Image: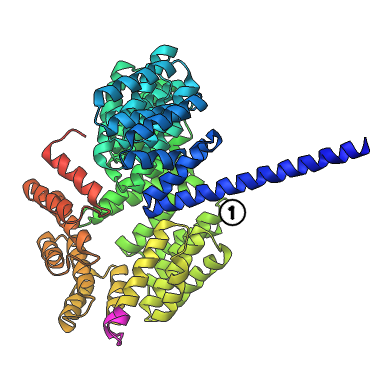
Amino acid sequence: MFISYHFRIVLIVIFTFLAISSYAQNLAEIQLADQYAVQGENDKAISIYERLEKNSKNIPQIHERYFQLLLITGEFDKAEKYVDKAIKQYPTNLFYQIDKGLIYLQLNEKQQAKKYYDGLISSWSEDPFKVRVAAQHFIRLQQYDNAIDLYQQSRKKINNPYEYSIQMASIYRIVNKHVDMIEEYLNYLHESQNSVASIKNIMQNVLTDDKDLELFENIMYAKIQEQPDNMQYSELLIWVNLQRKNFYSAFIQARAVDKRMNLLGTELMDIGRIAIENKDFKNSLRIYTYIIDEYPQTPNYQIARRMAIYCREELVKTTYPVRTSEINLLISDYQNLIAELGLNQYTAEAMRSEAHLYAFYIGNHDKAIQLLQTLIRSPAISKQIIDQAKLDLGDIYLLTGEPWEATLLYSQVEKSSKETPIGYEAKLRNAKLNYYNGEFELAQGHLDILKLATTREISNDAMALSLLIKDNLMKDSSDNALQRYADIELLIFKNRKDEAFALLDKLKKDYPFHPLQDEILYKQALLAMEIGDFSRSLISLNEIVDKYGSDILGDDALFLCGTVTEEYLHDKTRAMEIYQSFLAKYPGSNHAADARKRFRQLRGDTL
């Protein structure tokens, strides 16, 4: 008994050792064959694979390379014999069955291949598991039509027209059939009623240009006509209009949904906010005016009142030349709003705006300071708004020639609100103050930190100023030109436009080859716009395009040419020519989408 037990143990050890040795030997041979195949030594590789395939257990490890080598070397008879053996040994492996059809394709026997694949597809179409597995292999082989055919036949067999929608959409995306792709994503929406957010995220990634978004928009309009009560389609139509920055169209659609769902203007408020972020103040004003008229007894009313005046303010400030009568009317509207609703979180922003108008447009600095100090001392106002009021007050002290008072306030906010957007904003203002004072290295230190700020606008502003300082100090060891330019920017900040324009002209003449030339021209163009001299503005902009078109301000200058020509000179034909030239010259510019939209509007396209 004792001897027998030990004998069995010895046998187990021996057989285990032999099995491991055999496996290791096979693995070494497979690796050697694979190496030969990679190196292009096909005959050596095939010779080893032929020896290995005699043991059917090796087939899963060698199949892909071996079968491909047989096809590449034209050994079609061997390939067919081998794959038939593989199918017989592994009848449930669908990949081997699909691979057999590759022999017919290599022999250019397309009809035979189609007949063969049609048979496979028909036999698998009732089993969703087989369908998914086989379709994935068809896709790997780039046989997209067979994968689609398999999915479609299976849909009929299992009587579900929405099955496999995500998989089919992915294939249609690969083959650039965008209409079919969108239809399949909408099929997925039909199956998953809570997946609107998922579809938006997918569309954000797959609809890569305005033509794709336009196509999606047209499909959504058609769907809504077919199913006007489908709120998911309405939501997607609103979304695509927002993506295309067609804020009025988004508003019209959202207004209908708002009425039907009794949302009291909540979604409309969001659209108004997005329009403001994109500086479409005309349409945001329309939206807020609608909310004011329709929902006077709701919480949205107070915010909409404030935002409507703000939108009008932005329109007034960007309609050149700015009229003092319009500024006074805005101040009166802000005062009436505060008198009606009292000083609270909603109207505090109105008081900040009122102070800004007094300081920068009316020149009544004392009144502006009084308003801001009232805000800062108010116990009912949040710390964030108080911090913003402190920054505003700092700006006014800079305006009145008291930079030490300004930096004191900026530093207070920077210290009390570290690592927050308003703290970063305070640091940016301190950096600008250092820049105005000619302390360029100190300014650069602040800007290097701000370039990593989480707020994109602050980060972009920091990068722009940092680049201006670095470029111009690097190319000109003397900082005289940059200091003079900084002095002029401070004058512009103080609204002393005529004086700034004259000094820019002198700086341009004194440093004809300085890298600041395009910056000087762009500032002159903006100042000329603000005083209503649009022809002079175009002269400066065209000089940038002609001389510095490949530099950083080239696309900004040409786009602004189109804007001035369209909005102030009202020459639609010339504006269209400029936008068309812009799209040809700067297709990757941040202004490209807006230029394309403006061109289509001028052409009379329906947006």
In percent of width and height, residue 446 lies at 46, 72
Q: Quadrant of residue 521?
A: bottom left
In percent of width and height, residue 276 lies at 35, 46
Number of numbered discs on residues: 1
Residue, x 24% and y 31% (percent of image)?
A: 108
Residue 330 shown left or right of residue 544 in the figure: right
- Mark 1 packing: few (<14 Cα in 10 Å), some, or many (20+)? few
What residue sits right under mark 1 in the picture? 379
Q: Quadrant of residue 225?
A: top left
Residue 4 shown left or right of residue 64 in the figure: right
- Whether residue 222 is visible: yes
Which quarter shows the C terminus?
top left
303 or 358: nearer the eye?
Answer: 303
Residue, x 39% and y 58% (percent of image)?
A: 457
User: Was residue 256 drawn as part of the magenta stretch in this picture?
Assistant: no
Which quarter shows the N terminus?
top right
Please say if 240 is above or below 557.
Answer: above
User: Was residue 479 drawn as part of the magenta stretch in this picture?
Assistant: yes
Residue range corresponding to the magenta coloring: 472-482
In percent of width and height, residue 275 lies at 33, 43
Extreme-bottom residue of the structure:
478
Residue, x 34% and y 71% (percent of image)?
A: 467
Residue type, numbered disc 1: Pro
Please say if 217 is above or below 572.
Answer: above
